[in-house]
Amino acid sequence: MVPLVARRVLITVPLVVVVSFLVFLMIDLVPGDPAVKLAGENASAERIEAIREQLHLADPLLTRYLTWLGGSVTGDLGRSFVTNQEVGGLLWTALGATASLVLVTAVLMVVIGLVLGITAAVNHGRAADRIVVALCSVLVATPSFWLALLLVVFFAVDYAIFPAIGFVPLTEDPARWLYHLVLPGLALSARPSAELTLQLRAALTEVLQRDFVTAASARGLTRAQIVGKHALKNAAVPAVTVLGFRLAEIIGGAVVIETVFSLPGLGPLMVQSVLGGDVPVILGIVVLTMLWVALFNLLTDLSYLYLNPKART
Amino acid sequence: MTGTATPAAARTTPEPAAQSHRVSTMRRFLSDRMAVAAVVYLVLLILAAVFAPVLAPADPIAQDLAKRLTPPDGTYLLGTDDLGRDQLSRLLYGARVSLLAALEAVAVGVVVGVPLGALAGYVGGRVDTVIGRVMDSIMSIPGIMLALTAVAVLGRDITIAMMAIGVVLVPQFQRLVRASTQALRNETFVEASRTIGCSRSRILLRHILPNVLPVLVVQMSVMLGVAVTAEASLSFLGVGVQPPAPSWGSMLNNAVANTFTAPYLIYPPGLAITLTVLALALVGDGLRKATSIRRRSGEGR
Amino acid sequence: MTEPAVRTASVSDAAQHTLLDVRGLEKSFVRSRNFFGRATAHHAAVRDVSFSLAKGETLALVGESGAGKSTVGRLVLRLIEPDAGSVVFDGTDVSTLDRRDLVRFRRRTQMIFQDPYGSLDPRIDVGTSVGEPLLIHDKLPRAERDRRAEELLDKVGLSRRTAAAHPSELSGGQLQRVAIARALALEPDLIVCDEPVAALDVSVRAQVLNLMTDLQEELGLSYLFISHDLALVEVIADRVAVMRQGEIVEIGPAEQLYSAPRHEYTRELLAAVPVPVPPSLRTGRVARA
């Protein structure tokens, strides 16, 4: 376990340092006045001047970078150019919505993956199996944000069952929190759920064809019992791996889905910051994203270790 | 090429001829109906993109505010958007933009990833370790995030965004080529190439890379799908293809503002993306199956 | 480990000329590494191996798998670098060769491998593979290479039309003939044969061995013949070196080693030969089919 943690730290820390430095370097290397560039089109002269000042563009590159790095290590990520709020606070608020979305997505992934995966494996080769496989192949190819739009048109516009936009914090009202997250969660979980389903189906089908399963059914166990008792345990390792890695990279997909549903998460914050040249916020989100990915990759590695004792060396 | 090796001397045993593996690979691919359908779709799509100026009924960026948000009818087969632009024309021109953008990203991935993979796989040791660590690092940055950051710093431009996506694709190609190269490096024919005096570069270019090509083509197909989705996502977010240029993603960006009044706008571009990604995956699948059954066919010793 | 230069009836006076002289060869491989990629355990594959090989002679290296025979073969051709010891080929220490001289060395030495299905690039047609050495060393034009490739295929008893075939279309025996043709392309002095017939059917073995001995007589080749099969070695080798755990335990003329083995291990190996070698084969050369 210690080497795994050490390995992740050894990858993540240099990565954060290098990527954030590259951002500073790029700002410097872009031809023209970085302040004008960052301010975007039609920016006022005061705004350009404000950016120039806040980025300390008069200082040398390394000084600027080390100042930022020193601040971030102590938890001070600076202030937003646009709203002048503390970046740390902005990120913390946004992370609440994003984490909520990912939590709902993760639950949906497991439920959909298990239901469809088991259905397909138990009906191996029959119509149900083929329908599940075809559905998953299509879902894997469908862009999540388009699926989100389809869900909005169907459930919010045509039938008005679920809200198309908005977010209620969990602490405020758990029921409405979930109510607002159903559609975004479905959209975001579709693709990874499909992958998980196919993974589980393959693993379960393989396990169900092994000798001990035949022996178990000879002892009079029903298929459901066999799946529950033996097969799932054997299929768990690859499934958990898929789940973990998908949750690590889902932060990218969440950006787009949050924008569709106007969830106040990291996605809209990132897009607004990109459009407004809000470098401190962008840097903060980039660092947070890398930490997120590292954390979920680490959790995946650890759960693999836990589920597969043979891997403990 | 019928490979009949008629013995010249009596001491050679006559042995059965086999079909050329190129021919049989092709035959296996053609027997996969889904893959063939996918190829047909992709060919039609490319033709549509190339001949968009001929095929499109209208100028894709010409606005006609009098006809804004016209649902599909006889004149506007797919309707018009909130600026009165013909959606069919935008879809056809959008295919160009979307496919070219995807190609850019995959090109970056291949051009950087393949040599790094061949190098790491063939040389091994410390070089491999260092390249591997860098690839691990790149893989822990979501492509969308990298593209957004690049656009923020370097300017709002689809090429910049797709270059960033290309960077994220590099490890996908590097890992594949590395693994294949490592496997091939231990093949006898590579050692045999050394004994006849082949240089390292000749072994890599003439003997290893051509044998990596089949898996590489499969990977390119799948990664093109990833890149098409990435372009659509970025343009949808408004940081990819910039208005008024049409791309499938930017069309959806435009459609989302009119979800309630003109839901018909969201179907064609989304369907085009989904079908294209699906087709690329199916072609990749078909190629994988057709090329994986190969070699070691000579049982008749 | 010196012994008098041995001559058998079939070897000409050229045998007196030493082509290859190997002294004190050592090689070990890394068995395990730690987290940082540093080697933590080694395995000695070749220990203090010395022998010499005369022009036109066949020396067999025999032993069980893992005895280090193949490693010796690769060390001789400098496909891998030795930890210690020297390989002197025609008066030149192979380890001192620079890149250019190494290429020159490569044209005089060749190797034939055990796996006929794997020793040719599957994507390249047979003619091109056979002609490739001529491109690398002599920069011959395509047409000339193709012509030479067909001649070589003819020489090893294959149809000239085989040149257009891909490896996957040929049998093991045919592929091994192609490998021999390719090895002959540059008219080398030494061919290291690593279990060249072990993967072939018994019926095809004799044909390939016959071809090899015929070519040896015609071209004055020297063979370093690596095999685990003592019965096979007896019919092709002038001298035999028995290897165990990386060391040569006994080396001597074939007849002497088979009739009066000196080392215990050689006796064990001989006792394990499943079928007694037929008297007709004991005379020295392969019986003509």
Image (cartoon, coloured by chain):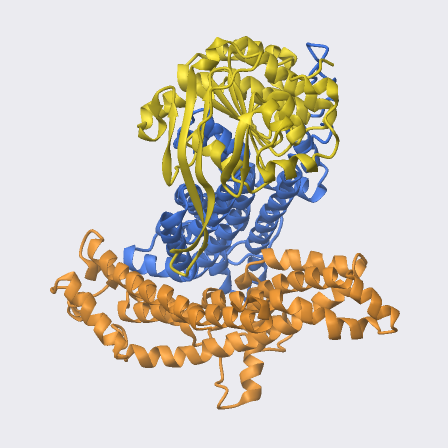
Looking at the rendering, in which quadrant would you find the C terminus of chain C?
Answer: top right
Label count reads 0
Position of residue A117 measured from the top left corner of the image (x, y, whole percent): 70, 66
Q: Nearer the viewer, residue C14 or B86?
A: C14
Position of residue B260 measured from the top left corner of the image (x, y, whole percent): 55, 68
Position of residue B212 measured from the top left corner of the image (x, y, whole percent): 52, 38
Q: Is residue B81 above or below residue B10?
A: below
A103 vs C287, left or right, is: left
Q: Nearer the viewer, residue B202 or B156?
A: B202
Identified at 42% across, 14% down, the residue is C17
A76 vs A162, left or right, is: left
Looking at the rendering, in which quadrant would you find the N terminus of chain C?
Answer: top left
Q: Quadrant of residue C255?
A: top right
- Of all chains in the rendering, the one displayed in yellow is C
Q: Is residue C183 above or below residue A105?
A: above
B70 vs A251, left or right, is: right
Q: Quadrant of residue A209?
A: bottom right
Q: Is residue C278 above or below residue A19?
A: above
- Of all chains in the rendering, the one displayed in orange is A
Residue B2 seen:
no
Q: Nearer the viewer, residue C61 or A197?
A: C61
Position of residue B239 measured from the top left corner of the image (x, y, whole percent): 38, 58
Identified at 15% across, 69% down, the residue is A53
Q: Quadrant of residue A160?
A: bottom right
- Of all chains in the rendering, the one displayed in blue is B
Name the residue at the bottom extreme. Answer: A172
Residue C156 seen:
yes
Identified at 49% across, 37% down, the residue is C71
Identified at 53% across, 33% down, the residue is C250
